[in-house]
Image: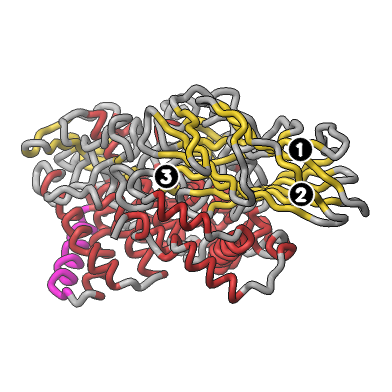
């Protein structure tokens, strides 16, 4: 079976569309155009996609995509007499470039020979589609864009005569490209886009009626002008398909899909899909987070994840999410990010959550090692095998199985999860004492810091490397968060083993967890400071400087209640961690606290905040957890506002959004913060 039709049932669009024609055929265009009467309305303009790229590398605006497409669109800021959507932004080549300002702009000439100019314009976005409405007293023009598949977006334009007399208008499409190594090539019945930098091919098709090309060169085209006669109150539809497809996917199959498609049926299908996903999120939300304001936050998080979703291409064999399409260095899949994405996705799309897990395990080595990050095109950037990331994949798989008891998925993943868990003890336990260290495959400190996921945290300022075996090196310190994660993994693995009837694994893992629990409680907790710290390899010297790793034992449920009490007190101290955006990566009163100049030396990362909130809940501090969640959501810039993107991290004292926009793991953890767990 070729990869194009191997993903999940979500991509059998043609079959689904045909079924909808019969089961929902009685629903008219007005019904498909009114998502604002449904729960989908919470996604209306939840992110701001308005903007015009000034050059191919512009990153000033957000981009809308769906179905895992490697291309995205916006809504134009500068409105002219041409009607069209911004872009597309092509992630099919380089690290993402704009193809141009608009691939298919429509010009309209009125019956009197003058260029038609609207006097009112509205633009809206939903999780399901983009739409524009233009009008004056004589003519209404409605335009919508929806993804029919991962490879094709449909652009529908409906022109309606608002007068009591028949009228005639002349329409013409045109498009232009930035000089990005992509060229227009005229083919029979359509325009092809060929790239010097990518094997992906673009196809531009005009579907509603025969449309000839009047002029074309490598960077511009115009269609021949067409006259449309509109009866009083009558409408005419124009339909354009924009396809960007990799060679793994047969163009002829995609072309057949497009030729048989009905726009309104596809739009209705997409609306129902997104309504179902948002309804699932609302259903799982905690009792204190059921109001409209939180539904909008959930919609923002869902759309953020949607816009980072990519189907398999090149080196990537399963679907997954970018950390952020908005930052050019994040056009790949990272292991730590993937586990977090999968948990967030599990609340509304378990199929995609499972794919995200498999996407990283496709690269598992024989010894169990999981690669840090992987990319579609390794000529742009190679996979990073210098390190892995903290072990959270068993947690992610368990959370997926809580929502979807897919035994085939469990049977496939269990041996792989077990090998990765064992790998830590084979390659990252220098003194073989059952306590692991972060490290690297190349012996470098920088890769070892990356392996922690907390790259420049102060606890690693004086780290040095020690060799374990060939291609396996450890830091000369044992990290509390790593071993707390491994403790949680043992319990999650034991739970999965029980389901599979693997009694020996179940007993062994529970026994190992009990031994590890005692070591964590005794080695890493400083009773004088009341905090969990990393130690040196001997386990006798604390590496001090209170950071978010100190509450990971609460998340893993490996601390004693007495230890949790002291951790809680410091977490809720306004001079330490209970600031405007609580539970940042290091204590406010530490001399090295520097959120604006330290990636992990003070900013609030929402994954760490979530681990803190969940840790408080685990030890009965429900009131503190709820209070902190509210302060996180209200303190972090724009999370509760329409149009403002979710950021990579936040300044804990001012709330200012920092670094990449449209950040997936932040969105995933916002979902987790609002869920009833």
Which structural element holds mark 1?
strand
Q: Residues within 10 Å of mark 3 (few under 14, many from 20)?
A: many
Indicate whether 414 appears above or below 183. Answer: below
Residue interval drawn in magenta: 502-519
State the quadrant of the N terminus: bottom left
Q: Are marks 2 and 3 in contact (CB under 8 Å)?
A: no
Q: Residues within 10 Å of mark 2 (few under 14, many from 20)?
A: many
Q: Earlier in the sequence, mark 3 or mark 1?
A: 1
Q: Is residue 642 among what the camera can see?
A: yes
Residue pictured at 52% horizontal, 31% vertical: 99
Residue 195 rendering spot, x and y as whole percentages: 41, 31
Q: Are marks 1 and 2 in contact (CB under 8 Å)?
A: yes
- Which of the pair 632/666 is nearer the observer? 666
User: Disc count in the image?
Assistant: 3
In terms of sequence position, does the residue under pointer 2 or pointer 3 come before the other? 2
Report the side of 10 relative to 60 (left or right): left
Residue occupied by mark 1: 108
CA separation, marks 2 and 3? 30 Å
Q: Position of residue 490 (x, y in %)?
A: 23, 61
Residue 463's label in the rendered image is none
**Does the residue at mark 3 contact the one at mark 1 (Cβ under 8 Å)?**
no
Q: Is residue 200 magenta?
A: no
Residue 245 disc label: 3
Question: Of helix, strand and loop, which mostly describes the magenta segment?
Answer: helix
Q: Which mark is residue 159?
A: 2
Circle 1 crowding by C-alpha within 10 Å: few under 14, some 14–19, many from 20: many
The quarter of the displayed image where residue 565 is located: bottom left
For the residue pair 400 and 617, the one nearer the viewer reads as 400
Q: Quadrant of residue 492?
A: bottom left
Q: Which callout, 2 or 3, points to the residue nearer the camera?
A: 2
């Amino acid at each position: 079976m070729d990869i194009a039709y191997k993903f999940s049932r979500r991509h059998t669009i043609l079959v689904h569309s045909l079924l909808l024609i019969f089961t929902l055929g009685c629903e008219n265009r007005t019904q498909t155009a009114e998502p604002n009467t449904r729960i989908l309305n919470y996604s209306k303009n939840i992110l701001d996609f308005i903007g015009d790229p000034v050059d191919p590398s512009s990153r000033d605006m957000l981009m809308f995509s769906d179905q895992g497409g490697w291309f995205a669109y916006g809504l134009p800021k500068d409105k002219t007499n041409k009607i069209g959507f911004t872009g597309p932004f092509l992630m099919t080549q380089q690290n993402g470039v704009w193809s141009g300002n608009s691939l298919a702009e429509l010009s309209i000439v009125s019956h009197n020979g003058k260029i038609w100019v609207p006097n009112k314009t509205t633009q809206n976005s939903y999780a399901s589609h983009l739409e524009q409405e233009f009008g004056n007293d004589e003519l209404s023009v409605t335009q919508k864009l929806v993804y029919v598949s991962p490879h094709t977006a449909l652009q529908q334009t409906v022109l309606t005569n608002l007068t009591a007399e028949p009228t005639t208008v002349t329409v013409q499409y045109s498009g232009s490209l930035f000089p990005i190594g992509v060229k227009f090539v005229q083919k029979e019945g359509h325009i092809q886009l060929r790239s010097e930098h990518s094997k992906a091919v673009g196809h531009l098709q005009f579907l509603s009626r025969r449309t000839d090309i009047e002029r074309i060169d490598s960077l511009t085209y115009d269609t021949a002008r067409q006259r449309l006669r509109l009866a009083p109150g009558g409408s005419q539809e124009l339909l354009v398909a924009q396809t960007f497809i990799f060679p793994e996917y047969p163009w002829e199959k995609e072309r057949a899909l497009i030729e048989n498609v009905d726009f309104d049926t596809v739009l209705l299908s997409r609306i129902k899909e997104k309504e179902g996903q948002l309804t699932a999120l609302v259903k799982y939300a905690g009792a204190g987070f059921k109001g409209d304001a939180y539904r909008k936050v959930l919609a923002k998080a869902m759309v953020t994840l949607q816009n980072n979703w990519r189907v398999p291409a090149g080196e990537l064999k399963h679907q997954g999410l970018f950390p952020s399409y908005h930052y050019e260095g994040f056009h790949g899949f990272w292991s730590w990010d993937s586990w977090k994405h999968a948990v967030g996705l599990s609340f509304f799309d378990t199929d995609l959550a499972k794919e995200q897990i498999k996407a990283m395990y496709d690269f598992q080595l024989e010894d169990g090692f999981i690669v840090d990050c992987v990319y579609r095109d390794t000529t742009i950037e190679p996979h990073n095998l210098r390190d892995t990331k903290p072990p959270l994949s068993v947690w992610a798989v368990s959370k997926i199985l809580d929502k979807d008891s897919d035994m085939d998925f469990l049977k496939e993943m269990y041996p792989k999860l077990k090998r990765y868990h064992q790998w830590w003890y084979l390659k990252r336990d220098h003194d073989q004492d059952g306590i692991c260290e972060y490290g690297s495959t190349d012996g470098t400190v920088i890769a070892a810091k990356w392996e922690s996921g907390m790259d420049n945290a102060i606890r690693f300022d004086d780290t040095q490397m020690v060799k374990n075996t060939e291609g396996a090196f450890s830091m000369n310190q044992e990290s509390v968060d790593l071993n707390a994660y491994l403790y949680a993994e043992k319990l999650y693995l034991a739970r999965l083993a029980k389901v599979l009837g693997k009694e020996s694994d179940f007993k062994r893992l529970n026994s190992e967890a009990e031994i590890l629990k005692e070591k964590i409680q005794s080695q890493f907790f400083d009773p004088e400071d009341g905090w969990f710290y990393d130690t040196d390899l001997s386990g006798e010297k604390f590496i001090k400087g209170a950071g978010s790793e100190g509450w990971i034992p609460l998340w893993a449920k490996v601390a004693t209640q007495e230890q949790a009490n002291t951790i809680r007190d410091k977490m809720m101290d306004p001079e330490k961690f209970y600031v405007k955006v609580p539970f940042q990566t290091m204590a406010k009163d530490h001399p090295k606290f520097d959120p604006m100049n330290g990636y992990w030396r003070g900013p609030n990362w929402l994954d760490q905040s979530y681990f803190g909130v969940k840790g408080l809940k685990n030890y009965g501090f429900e009131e503190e957890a709820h209070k902190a969640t509210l302060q996180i959501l209200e303190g972090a810039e724009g999370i509760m506002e329409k149009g403002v993107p979710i950021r990579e991290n936040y300044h804990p004292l001012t709330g200012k959004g920092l670094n990449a926009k449209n950040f997936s793991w932040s969105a995933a953890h916002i979902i987790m913060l609002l869920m009833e767990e």
